[in-house]
Amino acid sequence: MSIRKKFDLSAYFVVGPENTKGRSVAMIIKDVVEAGFTCIQIRSKVASARELIQLTREASEVIAQAGKSDEVVLLVDDRLDVILAAKQQGIKVDGIHVGQDDIPVEVCREYLGEDSIIGLSARTHDIFEYIKTVDVSQIDYFGVGPLHETMTKPDCGVDLDGKVITRSFEEISKIAQISPVPVVVGGGVKLIDIPQLAQTGVDGFFVVSAVSEADDPKQAAVDLVKTWKLYATVG
Ligand code: TZP
Ligand code: MG
């Protein structure tokens, strides 16, 4: 059984310099942390290792300045090298999020240790079969999606024929029931989806554009958190 501490992934924001409409990554993270988001993932396919370390540092500082170092989880997508370098520089980073084709979760666990959080995207369409093949003792949560097609990650949910397969609320409820670890759902999630999603029994939602593309990101983040809390409790 895992001895890892409990963490809250209910409101999870994924961000990198390519998603901020020119705003600073740190400022937008400050907004969502103040709005009550519980998890931040730094994710960039264009930033250099040094930029990613710097973004991780800034995110960690923003979370600390908000007095939320013990409650807000800070993760980095894919980049075990960045996380190890950041930790070596004294930056508080809580773990990694990887996909099925990225560094194996066993390797992440070996390098990051028992206390780190490791999230795994379940991309395979037959997720019920896929879950059986994963050593769930190595992971802390599954990322599942997309709920809708999304321009933020155009290959999300694309099958071998190039067709996008989205997940229905019914399927998401079943995944929540069978998964041995917490489940967060993202990909095209907007405010309007939150009531139904919260009632599927999953542990959280993750978004990029619902916050980053909003005219007022902080207000968008507040509305997402408030709505999740309202409906997750009645679900
Ligand atoms: N992983 C799966 S979908 C996705 C990621 C990082 C992007 C979701 O972006 P958006 O803008 O919330 O649809
Ligand atoms: Mg990846």
Image (tube, rainbow, N blue to C red):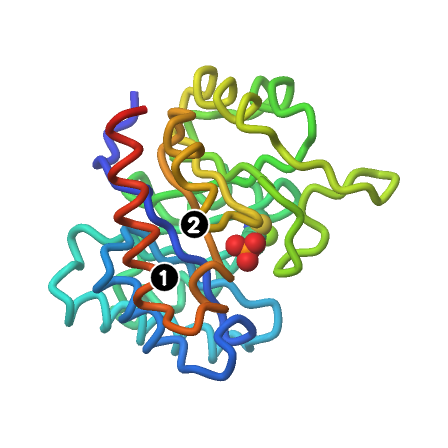
* Residue 191: percent from left, percent from top: 43, 50
Whether residue 138 is visible, yes or no, is yes
Left of 16 or right of it: where is 220?
Answer: left
* Residue 227: percent from left, percent from top: 31, 44
Q: Amino acid at mark 1?
A: Ala
Distance in Å between CA atoms under marks 2 and 1 = 8 Å
What secondary structure is marked by label 2?
A: helix
Q: Is residue 38 above or below residue 179?
A: below
Left of 203 or right of it: where is 158?
Answer: right
Q: Residue furthest front?
A: 192
State the quadrant of the C terminus: top left
Which is more toward the observer, 190 or 37? 190
Q: Is mark 2 within 8 Å of ligand 1?
A: no
User: Residue 1 lies in what quarter of the image?
Assistant: top left
Q: Amino acid at mark 2?
A: Leu
> Mark 1 and mark 2 in contact (Cβ < 8 Å)?
yes
The label shown at residue 203 is none
User: Residue 153 lies in what quarter of the image?
Assistant: bottom right
Residue that label 2 marks: 191
The residue drawn where x is 37% and y is 51% is 12
The residue drawn where x is 36% and y is 33% is 203
Q: Is residue 119 above or below residue 80?
A: above
Which is more toward the observer, 119 or 62? 62
Whether residue 139 is visible, yes or no, is no
Q: Give the total number of marks visible in the rendering.
A: 2
Between discs 2 and 1, the one toward the N terminus: 2
Which is more toward the observer, 22 or 101? 22
* Residue 10: percent from left, percent from top: 32, 42
Residue that label 1 marks: 220
The residue drawn where x is 38% and y is 25% is 201
